[in-house]
Amino acid sequence: MTKTERRIRVMVADDNELRGEMLVKILVENGYDVVGMAGPDSYLPTQVAQAKPDLILIDTDAPTRDTLEQLTQIKQDMPRPVVMFSADEAQDTIRAAVRAGVSAYIVDGLSNSKVKPVIDVAIAHFQQHQTMREELERTKTSLEERKTIDRAKGIVMKKKGCNEDEAFALLRRVAMDQKKRIGQVAAEIVQVAGLFSEQQQRKEVGS
Amino acid sequence: MHADNKPLIDQPSWVGRAETLEKSQLDLGFIPLSDCAPLAIAYEKGFFERHGLRVTLRREASWASIRDKTMLGIFDAAHMLYPMPIAMTLGVGGVQCPMVTAMCLSLGGNAITVSNLLYDEMSGVASDFNSQRESSARALKKTIEARRRSGKGPLRFGVVFPTSTHHYELRFWMASAGIDPDADVKVLVVPPPGMPDAMRNGKIDGYCVGEPWNSFTVERGWGKTLITKQGLWNNGPEKVLGTTKTWAEQHPNTHQALVRAVLEACVWSDQQENREEVASIIAQQRYIDAPIETVRMSMLGQYQYDLDHPPQPHPDFMSFHRYAANFPWHSHAKWFMTQMLRWKQLEEVPDFDQVAGQVMLTELYRSAARELGVAAPTINEKSEGTHQDQWVLEQATTPIIMGTDLLIDNRCFDPSDPMGYLNERLARTKR
């Protein structure tokens, strides 16, 4: 971006505050002018009227998206009309953006060639964030699953009077027979055992 | 599939035809509202599978997202606001994409609810409007005048989307009493599940939304319903199963199968004896995620306007099949086009017949209905505002019992002259 050119004014609306802040940082680093950040409690049309962005980047799945739609109407109080995805040549960019989880509202008058790089930055960032989250989720599940399997092994060992290896072999066999994951079988065992001990306790309390 | 879920005809002709489907794995979008029931029921009761389809239902947080994901082919089809495919085809709202629908999913289901504060204000200037619900708009008119005299700011009303049935219904209701929705009040867009909180927090004074978001406010005592959609337009159409024209052209057999599956679900969901189950299914977390009591009453044919009065019978509050509900009437599309013109969302007069014919796939509906042995209209248009009692539609494969179709302004809509209808309105309200 040359210095004589007016910077593109971008507003970021994301209910995920951390992701939104990161995106703002990246946009600023790339030479864009970030004129506002909106979270779940903002009323977007008011913010847009005040900040007058050229482009609004918003999480595709944000419930607040519909509030922006009234800006696309012919008759409204806002200073400038907002048109989203008006040109057909941007179709591929738009599809990629929506798939990545970001939607863009383009204020009338901004050419596609200027919009595309900003959206590309946002897409890359959203995808990276998504990968990170999935990674985190996987690590969390496997940790939790391991804990559940350990508990199930303990229950089996106590009931069957067997050692740890034998308990694990039993879990694995049941899982194979029932075409389930070991983690699933373990979770079921833990759940059922919990039910019995609850009944046991209730009986004890009742007697 | 459950035992009580018996097929409409014994030996379906589509059996063994799965291989002719262009696509059998479908992604369908929906919004958490009571009228997503046909899609939820088609999924839960195995109707999709019966027609060779493996469907994933995707819950969306906004109508904009439903529109965009369908337009971009991320969804094959979706639960859409009735005017949406028409608006998208005409390019109303910044997005232009030729759309189609072969079936309506539901009639009715909306209401206009206001805050207790506004209700009290209205009661102060006009008594007894709650027993004469059609007079509620006149009470609002008086309230607006009183507020203006005392220098109070304009009232704010929420609707769910610019090209929503709710938006046109709210404006239609106001205009019936001579209120100018653009000058006399502020109309804001608020997502459906956010409506009750927005009103409770004083961001809006009233709203028009679909169930269960009126009952949600009423049963908590946060506000009172003034009028239901039934009082604005008897048995008016509400949602459609929409897709792009391109998708429909590329997947004719799949589209047929999809319409058959959803039509079967509509027939099933419409029966009174199944409504309890419909309510318990759609209340679940993966659909509406609301308390069962909130969803239940309007689904069972009752409606409670406010906590001061007991629930009232409202048998046609929301219909999924009766009264030829699923037929994509060209005339309904035309009525919505008159509203887009009336409220200046559309600047140029469209070719009513061409657009209605392009968007509303009546032939596809007829052929799906024929295969299921369901009666279908043989005409594409009907007038509105002419039947104050139930009537029989003779122009159908077998005669169909039809519901009342009065409009709140007591006028008739003749689909052969949509501009005549619009001009009469503009002349009367100087808009």
Image: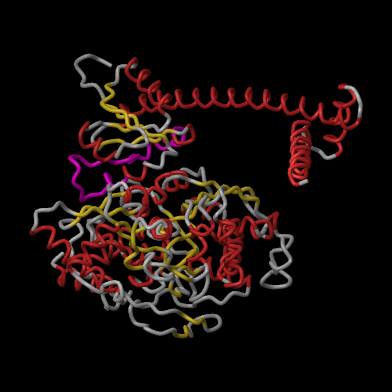
In this view, the residue in front, A70 or A175, is A175
Is residue A70 one of those drawn in magenta?
yes
B2 and A118: which is toward the camera? B2
Where's residue B122, x and y in %? 22, 65
Residues shaded magenta: A69-97
Front residue (pair B402, B126): B126
Q: Residue at x 47, y 55 (%)?
A: B33
| Quadrant housing the N terminus of chain B | bottom right
Q: Residue B349, relative to residue A49: is it above or below?
A: below
Image quadrant in which the C terminus of chain B is located: bottom left
Give the residue at the far front of this rendering.
Answer: A207
Q: Where is residue A100 in the image (x, y as percent from the top left)?
A: 48, 32
Residue A85, above or below B83: above
In the foreground, B404 or A173: A173
Which colour assignment does the render follow? secondary structure
Q: Where is residue A179 in the image (x, y as percent from the top left)?
A: 81, 38
Vertical placement of B216 versus B297: above or below?
above
Q: Please tell me whether residue B182 is drawn above or below residue A83 in the rendered image.
A: below
Q: In which quarter of the image is residue A57?
A: top left
Residue at 40% x, 27% y is A17
State left or right for residue B73 relative to residue B371: left
Q: Residue B189, position in %: x, y?
A: 31, 49
**A78 to the left or right of B356:** left
Question: In which quarter of the view is residue B311 placed?
Answer: bottom left
Q: Residue at x 32, y 54 (%)?
A: B159
Quarter-wise, where is residue A156 in the image?
A: top right
The residue that appears at 37% across and 41% down in the rendered structure is A64
- Count of labels in the image: 0
Q: Please give left or right for residue B77 compared with residue B148 in the image.
A: right
Q: Is residue B92 magenta?
A: no
